[in-house]
Image (tube, rainbow, N blue to C red):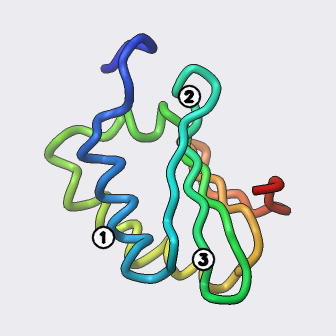
Amino acid sequence: MGDHNNGVDPQKIEIVKSCLATAFKDVRHRQEGNNDLQFFVFHDGTQSSQLVITRSFLDDLRIEQLAWLKTYMDKIIILRLKAKVGKKVSLSNSGIDISEKDPD
């Protein structure tokens, strides 16, 4: 879909950010590794947490799946993040992984 010279579809980033912003505070986004990793850092008022999404996961989503992405974020990812405050949740085509977070 997208080649690595271009960024990830901004609509997809905005969906992720808006879902995080409804559940957490101070949502920040950065890209790393030639835009291959999308990092979101946020906090619940006490601890910061991280969500890392691979570019391939986002690139593989078609425009018709944007509503699915919002539902997936709201019903699955946000619940995992709330259950694992202070951790890093990684999302890829292989699934969801929870680990210790990187230094902010």
Crowd class of label 3 (few under 14; some 14 to 19; many from 20; radius 10 Å): some
Q: In the image, residue 90 lies at what x, y percent?
A: 65, 53
Residue 1 in the image: above or below residue 12:
above
- Per the model, the C-alpha gap separating discs 3 and 2 is 22 Å
Figure quadrant of the C terminus:
bottom right
- Looking at the image, which residue is at 60% across and 77% down? 80
Foreground of the two, 66 or 31: 31
- Looking at the image, which residue is at 30% across and 70% down? 71
Q: In the image, residue 34 lies at what x, y percent?
A: 57, 20
Crowd class of label 2 (few under 14; some 14 to 19; many from 20; radius 10 Å): some
- Looking at the image, which residue is at 63% across and 58% down? 96
Q: Which mark is residue 36?
A: 2
The amino acid type of the residue labelled 1 equals Thr
The amino acid type of the residue labelled 3 equals Arg
Crowd class of label 1 (few under 14; some 14 to 19; many from 20; radius 10 Å): some
Q: Which mark is residue 71?
A: 1
Secondary structure beneath dot 1 equals helix
Q: In the image, residue 12 lies at what x, y percent?
A: 31, 47
Mark found first going from the N terminus, 3 or 1: 1
The residue indicated by pointer 3 is 80
Total labels: the figure holds: 3
Answer left or right for 7 relative to 43.
left
